[in-house]
Amino acid sequence: MAGKTRREAIDAYLEPLKETLACVCPQHYRHVAYHGPDPDGLYVLVVNRLEPVPLRRQDGSRLWFDVRQMFRVVEAEGLRGPYTVATAAYLYQISHDDGRELLAFHWHPHGQGKRTTPHVHIGPAVEQVAESVRELHVPTGYVSLEAVVRFLIDELSVAPQRPDWHDVLARNEERYNQERT
């Protein structure tokens, strides 16, 4: 995720994320870009023009996947430099085809509510869950995009879009863990 220029650092950050998304996102919905920086130096990762991506499940039903990340380009030393990218916030939301939220993984350390640590929301699509549980912010620790994509495939039966998805996710998550700031 390091680069000699800010642009190189951003490209190095986006490339494995694009590869990760390609594990579940149909070809037509793989557009990944970014906007920014804003006055605070934040960039916004834009997947599918900020629209949720339809995902096909093994049983033919569909889920929707909304991916949003904010990141900064920061100066770094050594192998990480002179520029690298640091994730500043994320939202990964999984919804049923009828629009009801199933799960949402959040981390927004600088705003958007009182919880600034990583957490997951249990949505109204989770049947027979008490209303009070849906309002909880269940702590999680940092959740990588790769972990969410693996969850989609392994636990929610989303059909993988590439045969090497397991290797791609393992490689990209390992790379992220080694280089994260």
Image (cartoon, rainbow, N blue to C red):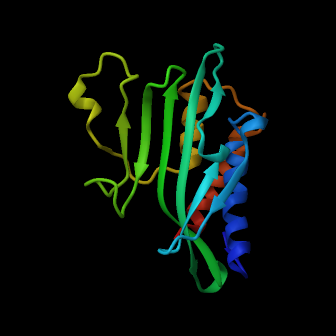
Instruction: Return the x and y of residue 18 as percentages of the image width and height.
Output: 71, 50
Q: Quadrant of residue 130?
A: top left
Q: Quadrant of residue 83?
A: bottom right
86, above or below 147, in the image: below
Q: Residue furthest top?
A: 59
145, above or below 117, in the image: above
In terms of depth relative to the viewer, which is nearer, 142 or 18? 18
Label total for image: 0
In terms of depth relative to the viewer, which is nearer, 164 or 34? 34
123, above or below 173, in the image: above
Instruction: Return the x and y of residue 158 as percentages of the image width and height.
Output: 63, 26
In terms of depth relative to the viewer, which is nearer, 142 or 68? 68
Instruction: Return the x and y of residue 179 as percentages of the image width and height.
Output: 60, 68
Residue 81 visible? The answer is no
Which residue is painted at 70% across and 31% down in the image? 160
Residue 47 visible? The answer is yes
Which residue is painted at 29% across and 21% down in the image? 129
Which residue is painted at 58% across and 83% down in the image? 76
Image-based side of 108 in relation to 154, left or right: left
Image-based side of 150 in relation to 8, left or right: left
Q: Residue furthest front?
A: 39
Q: Assign the N terminus to one quadrant of the image.
A: bottom right
Q: Residue furthest left?
A: 132
Which residue is painted at 29% across and 31% down in the image? 134
Instruction: Return the x and y of residue 33 as percentages of the image width and height.
Output: 69, 56
